[in-house]
Amino acid sequence: MKFKALSVALAFAVPTMVNAFELLPLKEVREQVRFVELTDIEKVTLVEQAKLVLEQIYVNQHQKNEYYGVSPTADGHLDPIKTINDIAANVAHLSTAQLHTQLSQLFISQRDLHLNYTLPAPFGEHQSYLPFNFDRVTHNGDEFAVALSSVWGSFAARFPGQPVPQVGDLVVAYQGEPIAQAVKSRQAKSAGANPYAGFARTLNDMRFQSHRSTTLPQDDTVTVTLESASTGELYDVTVDWLLYHPVKIGGAAIAENTSDQAKNDSADNSPIINSDAQALLEILPQSAQTQSYYDGFELARDTEIQMGEIAPSPVSAWPANNRAPGGAYYFDTVNYKGQTIGYLNISTFAPQLNWVNELFGIRDVVAAAQNTTDALVIDVRNNGGGYVLLSEMLPQLFIPQETKAHDYRLLNSPLNQYIYTQTAYGQSEPEFAASLAEVAGTDTKYSRNVPLTPSFYANSFKQVYSKPVAVLSNARSYSATDLFVCGMQDNDAAVIYGEDPQTGAGGASVRTHSSFIADFGAPFAALPQDISIRSSYMQTVRFGHHVGQLIEDYGCIADVRVDRTQADIVTLNQTQQEKVLDGLLSQAKARASGTPLAADASGLAVSAEQLILPVRMKNTGLVRISVASSLFVEPITLTTQYVGVYGNERVYNLQLPAELAGLKGAATYLFLEGLDEGKQPLWNNKQLLRIN
């Protein structure tokens, strides 16, 4: 199978910001922000293309009606097929603003961040802010309490005479409504799935809105009632919605190219770090080497940093961000109760740097941590997603058994049948073509389940870390991050600790409307202005402990809840961190382990004359020895040796097969599998070996 589908990232691109910007009260500039009028023909084209996507491409159309109910529902869900047909029937009577508003609300009401109707420039270039941020906390038995988690540095200057809110103050009411009711009444106009992701997304929308997806806030000002964390007193603040534009309110030429094509084709040209990374890139098409990423939390944070309103790296009990610019991750350690805990923060699965380099970088960092840490925390909170392949190739690093990856399925529609029989998609993705052919002409809703990440790639690196692992997630862990968290859980690779009880629940790969035009054209047609449409395309199906279950709407349920409290907001997550670390150190440690001892920083080395490799080992009966010419070639088994290393860990001198002497001066990949005497896997290790 070729890997066209693997490359699809699960969110869209962050527009490049320039230094100049304009930020003004919405009430002063509301009239300056207008849509460019659509012609009657453009309106019809727009609705026809939206109808085509929703009826024939959108894989979650049935799931959304089953989960939320058939519209009209009390929580505002709209049946996507019925509603788009209603809009089509009435399009001749809709103004441009009315049409954009109705289409925007239809897409948002599905609560699927992979389904997007993007409003055109100059309207869509604007963002609206309140000068603080909210987060869910548990407080006095209420799991849906809300506290301020940040306040703009310019608050006092912008709003003289208003009391200055403090981080940790509880939000009691919003626009006169009790906060829980205020969130519930606005949730239909936010995109988050399940109760926790919906709550998180709605809270974000109540203080930040990107007008690429939503129209302007209805109110010019917002009054928030707060309870002081220090005194318990209640007080009100009334603030303006502040409208942002990267150049000038109302729209102005932006130096950078922020077209849809530029956002989705921002290939990174950073050097490939090694030959194995190069080999992987050569297997994958160019589309797998570009990044396509967007998340509302990221967009808001990045803009606020640029405006100087919040710190780039907020102080926290967890190690501070030392991530390379454009990278996906950073690593540090925490000393806790005499133990050294590794801390791996993966902030995105769609790095601006080459994602294959980041994949190898994460592997190398984790491998090094095997010898320097007692346990590992992987923090993916607020990670909005990215590449399927990157997220599904990581769980193998933590388990000795064969790693499994998720399955995917397509909507059984006439258009998908056409795409996979009459276009190049059928040749590049033959497994999906076959799965659709099996249900052609039937009422079956979906194709047969097929993996996007083949087993060989999900197991190409093998295990590099055998100590206890915790994954820390929240309701903003979305898309490819859902895949990673669920993959770690279903492969028994880690215990999942949830800042929220469920992850964000984005269970699909995606396709853009423009990609279908580029690939084969009709029946897809260009959208007017710079409007874009994106849809969930392949629905994710879980395996293992949750076989057959969907990620969409449900997400991954945490094994251990570590909800933040009001005290955590004030003390920088100190209590949460202690709960995670105490739990992590109480996890059962691997009964067996094996780690070859490297000769130097470049890897393993043995002499051709002796072929002795020292391996730090415990509770291992047998070692299977295999070799391969690269990471991405199936290894050849040479022999299985009895070692009988039981009890305390010790160094065992493993005798390698004599035939390896013939590879003197060359480099090969050595694959060691520790087995019990019933030949069940206990640990494995795959590293480059030099024979001197």
Image (cartoon, rainbow, N blue to C red):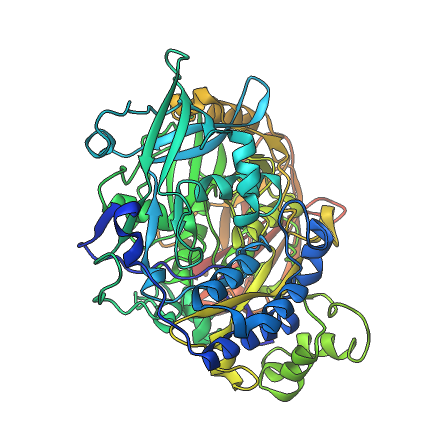
Is residue 201 shown to the viewer in this render?
A: yes
Is residue 654 shown to the viewer in this render?
A: no
What x and y, as percent, mark residue 313? Answer: 30, 38
Along the line of sight, which residue is nearer the eye, 652 or 550? Answer: 550
Q: Which residue is painted at 49% across and 26% down in the image?
A: 576
374 w.r.t. 267: above or below: above
- Specify whether 234 is left or right of 394: left
Q: Which residue is painted at 25% across and 48% down in the image?
A: 28
364 w.r.t. 184: above or below: below
What x and y, as percent, mark residue 528? Answer: 42, 77
Q: Residue furthest right?
A: 442
Quadrant containing the N terminus in the rendered view? bottom right
- Specify whether 546 is left or right of 299: right
Along the line of sight, which residue is nearer the eye, 34 or 271? Answer: 34
What x and y, as percent, mark residue 386? Answer: 47, 58
Q: Residue furthest top?
A: 231
Along the line of sight, which residue is nearer the eye, 280 or 122? Answer: 122
